[in-house]
Image (cartoon, rainbow, N blue to C red):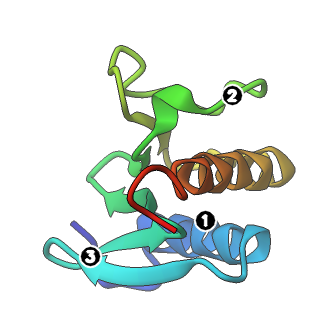
């Protein structure tokens, strides 16, 4: 996973995406799970961030249910539940579009609350 080198493009890219997530949702909870994978949650898991040799992957737990008018999702498109954004070296993600996508994911998590048995 991560190389741990702050000069590595993957570490820098993941740090930038973390900044955007925190800007979009200051109430998001970040935890390290599954061998140090960052997991961002708000009313449930929103997304995870993983670093690989050639990509930084942000996987949205309920991505298939999220409206993506800016077409940020470019990986795991055939899945019935998850969707991912793969970022390669030198690529950038539209910050405003990403923050809007993240907030739509939070809203989907929140929509599932308050059903039978909860109150």
Q: Nearer the viewer, mark 3 or mark 1?
A: 1
The disc, 2 or 3, on the residue closer to the chain's N-terminal end is 3
> Which residue position is annotated with label 2?
67
102 up-or-down from 49: above or below: above
Picture residue at 61% right of the left edge, 33% below the top = 66
Residue positioned most to the left? 35
Q: Nearer the viewer, mark 2 or mark 3?
A: 2
Residues 9 and 27: in front is 27
Label 2 sits on a secondary structure element that is: loop
> Which residue position is annotated with label 1?
17
> Which residue position is annotated with label 3?
3
Label 1 sits on a secondary structure element that is: helix
> Where on the picture, by quarter, is residue 47?
bottom left
Q: Horizontal and vertical percent for residue 16?
A: 63, 70
The disc, 3 or 1, on the residue closer to the chain's N-terminal end is 3
The disc, 1 or 2, on the residue closer to the chain's N-terminal end is 1
Picture residue at 69% right of the left edge, 28% below the top = 68
């Amino acid at each position: 996973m991560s190389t741990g080198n702050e000069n590595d493009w993957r570490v820098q890219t993941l740090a930038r995406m973390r900044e955007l997530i925190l800007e979009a949702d200051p109430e998001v909870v970040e935890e390290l799970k599954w061998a140090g994978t960052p997991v961002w949650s708000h009313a449930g898991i929103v997304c995870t961030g993983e670093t690989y040799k050639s990509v930084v992957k942000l996987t949205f737990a309920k991505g298939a249910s999220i409206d993506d008018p800016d077409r940020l999702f470019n990986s795991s498109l055939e899945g019935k539940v998850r969707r991912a954004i793969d970022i390669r070296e030198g690529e950038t993600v539209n910050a405003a579009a990403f923050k809007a996508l993240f907030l739509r994911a939070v809203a989907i998590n929140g929509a599932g609350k308050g059903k039978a048995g909860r109150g």
